[in-house]
Image: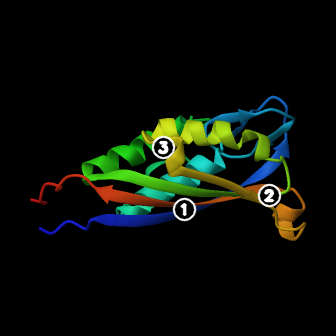
Amino acid sequence: MSVIPFRVGQGLAFHRLIADPARPLLIGGVEIPGSYALAGHSDADVLLHALADALLGAIGKGDIGEFFPDNDPTLKNMDSRRIITFALDAVREAGYAVGNADVILIGEKPKFTPHKPAIRASLAELLGVTPEQIACKATTTEKMGALGRSEGLGCTVVVSLIAVAVPAPDR
């Protein structure tokens, strides 16, 4: 069985932005202060959802909705770091390690620039890499569309995986 030396995956996620001071706004495992939150069945961490889809996609395992359905009451308000742990376990089982991750947050509010170092550090810790292996960028839609009206946030992530071991053959 031949091993592909590297793989690439991409993830994309969106969540509605709501005003709810009782619910934390979590981005990349970091709580962003303010009165905004993201609506969702889990903790709605849009970055971690896109990241998990990128990791799973890189190894051909589908998307997080297949493993963490939003109609499962046991997953209500689940910490999205659990999804990342699941995805990373699958990546390691397939014989890969994370090479890097490139993240783009999309939305008008809140402003992410002051939070980028904390988000990079959080992602590096979650993925077991250095902060230099994480790119964290943000953009707006120049006030166009639902994201431009601050109705939601989006995130896109691209990851590279590097082969570290030969996976066991399927039997």
Binning the other alpha carbons within 10 Å of mark 2 as few (below 14), some (14 to 19) or many (20 upward) gives: many
Residue 23 placement (x, y as % from top left): 76, 32
Residue 51 placement (x, y as % from top left): 53, 53
Residue 122 placement (x, y as % from top left): 57, 36
Binning the other alpha carbons within 10 Å of mark 1 as few (below 14), some (14 to 19) or many (20 upward) gives: many
Q: Give the left or right position of residue 98, taking residue 106 as reference.
A: left
Farthest residue in the front direction? 132
Towards the viewer: 141 or 45:
141
Towards the viewer: 70 or 124:
124
Q: Quadrant of the C terminus?
A: bottom left
Q: As shown in the figure, which amino acid type bears the numbered disc 3? A: Ile
Q: Which residue is mark 3?
A: 83
Determine the CA span between mark 1 and mark 2: 16 Å
Towards the viewer: 1 or 62:
1
| Residue at (90% x, 61% y) in the render | 149
Answer with mark 3 or mark 1, whichever residue precedes in sequence. Answer: 1
Q: Quadrant of the N terminus?
A: bottom left
Determine the CA span between mark 3 and mark 1: 13 Å
Q: Which residue is mark 2?
A: 107
Query: Circle 3 — which element?
Result: helix
Q: Which residue is mark 1?
A: 11
Regarding residue 65, the answer to whether it shows in the image is no
Q: As shown in the figure, which amino acid type bears the numbered disc 1? A: Gly
Regarding residue 106, the answer to whether it shows in the image is yes
Q: As shown in the figure, which amino acid type bears the numbered disc 2? A: Gly
Does 70 sit above or below residue 158? above
Q: Give the left or right position of residue 50, taking residue 87 as reference.
A: right
- Residue 36 occupies quadrant: top right
